[in-house]
């Protein structure tokens, strides 16, 4: 089916009180595996292309792969720019056929975040695409994205209210103690803060750093309004594990199939968790 926007799949998630997975794709094999599982589970998917893949020159290549697979698929598929660093990158993604872009202005002063998000929204709307923005900071490091440790990490409810009044994006990523990468201990998510944000915001909320968050925390986050959950590190590690377990075979396709099988196993578990028993 034709590609869809973030707004369309998040409307489904809101109706069903579930979350849509945003799986980062870094090569064709991972993309194939994720699409196959999502079709088997009959569940929408967001194929996210992040900064490491972009630095590796893969933005147009992965977007083309995703478009081909989506065209022959019966499920709704979004191609999404993850942690867009500036407006030039947003333009490039839109020119490559992305149906959704994230502009990450969370490192900027509040007013600059509003301004860059507003400009990203103007660019996206010319292409019929949607926009995700971010408030608060996501801890950890992924694709060399990190934050100044001196900056407060938890999203502030007053900032959410002011941001939504200034610019109407389609999704809002919030910092509630979540982190990129794999957590070193039990995640310390501030569900009270998430609940407060959900109470004052009608914009669908996004949880970054979904790799390694326990199932009960994921389900609680969904119950408090999270409608999109990002998973990147676990996908990559699963693929690597599959390759490592079969490397002694010396056969390219044996290793590739093992990597894809490991990704499929993880993606299926995440989809069923994110469905939260409601879809």
Image (tube, rainbow, N blue to C red):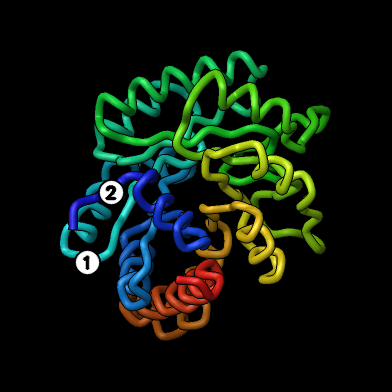
Q: Position of residue 198 (x, y in %)?
A: 65, 44
User: Is 279 positioned to the left or the right of 112 in the image?
Assistant: left
- Which residue occupies the foreground of this view, 227 or 245? 227
Q: Secondary structure at mark 2?
A: loop
- Which residue occupies the foreground of this view, 147 or 207? 207
For the residues labelled 2 and 1, the Cα–Cα distance comes to: 12 Å
Q: Residue at x 55, y 55 (%)?
A: 229
Q: Position of residue 79 (x, y in %)?
A: 33, 47
User: Is 134 positioned to the left or the right of 82 in the image?
Assistant: right
Q: Of the numbered discs in the image, which one, if any, rests on residue 249?
A: none
User: How many circles with numbers are drawn on the protein?
Assistant: 2
- Which residue occupies the foreground of this view, 235 or 21? 21
Is 249 above or below relative to 189?
Answer: below
Report crowding for label 1: few under 14, some 14 to 19, many 20 or more residues within 10 A (C-alpha).
Answer: some
User: Is 39 positioned to the left or the right of 24 in the image?
Assistant: left
Q: Secondary structure at mark 1?
A: loop
Q: Residue at x 48, y 70 (%)?
A: 271
- Which residue occupies the foreground of this view, 274 or 50? 274
User: Is 243 positioned to the left or the right of 130 in the image?
Assistant: right
In which quadrant will I find the N terminus?
bottom left
| Disc 2 target residue | 4
Q: Please indicate, yes or no, whether residue 23 appears anywhere in the rendered image.
A: no
Q: Please indicate, yes or no, whether residue 106 appears anywhere in the rendered image.
A: yes
Q: Residue at x 61, y 46 (%)?
A: 142
In which quadrant will I find the C terminus?
bottom left
Q: Position of residue 63 (x, y in %)?
A: 28, 47
Contact (CB < 8 A) between labels 2 and 1?
no
Report crowding for label 2: few under 14, some 14 to 19, many 20 or more residues within 10 A (C-alpha).
Answer: many
Mark found first going from the N terminus, 2 or 1: 2
Q: Of the numbered discs in the image, which one, if any, rests on residue 74?
A: 1
Q: Residue at x 30, y 50 (%)?
A: 62
């Amino acid at each position: 089916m034709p590609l869809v926007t973030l707004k369309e799949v998040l409307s489904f998630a809101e109706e069903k009180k579930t979350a849509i997975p945003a799986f980062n794709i870094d090569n064709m094999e991972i993309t194939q595996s994720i699409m196959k599982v999502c079709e088997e589970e009959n569940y929408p998917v967001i194929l996210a292309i992040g900064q490491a893949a972009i630095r590796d020159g893969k933005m147009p290549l992965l977007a083309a792969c995703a478009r081909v697979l989506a065209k022959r698929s019966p499920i709704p598929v979004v191609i999404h720019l993850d942690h867009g660093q500036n407006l030039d990158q947003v333009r490039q993604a839109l020119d490559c056929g992305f149906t959704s872009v994230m502009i990450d202005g969370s490192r900027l002063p509040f007013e600059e975040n509003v301004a860059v998000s507003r400009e990203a929204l103007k660019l996206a709307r010319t292409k019929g695409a949607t926009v995700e923005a971010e408030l608060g900071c996501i801890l950890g490091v992924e694709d060399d994205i990190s934050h100044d440790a001196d900056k407060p990490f938890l999203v502030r409810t007053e900032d959410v209210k002011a941001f939504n009044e200034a610019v109407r994006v389609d999704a809002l990523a919030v910092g509630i103690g979540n982190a990129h990468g794999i957590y070193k201990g039990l995640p310390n998510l501030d569900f009270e803060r998430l609940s407060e944000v959900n109470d004052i915001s009608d914009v669908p909320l996004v949880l970054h750093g979904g790799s390694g968050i326990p199932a009960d925390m994921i389900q609680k986050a969904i119950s408090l309004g999270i409608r999109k959950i990002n998973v990147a590190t676990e996908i990559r590690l699963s693929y690597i594990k599959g390759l490592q377990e079969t490397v002694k075979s010396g056969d390219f396709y044996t290793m590739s199939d093992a990597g894809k099988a490991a990704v499929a196993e993880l993606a299926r578990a995440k989809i069923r968790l994110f469905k939260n028993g409601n879809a």
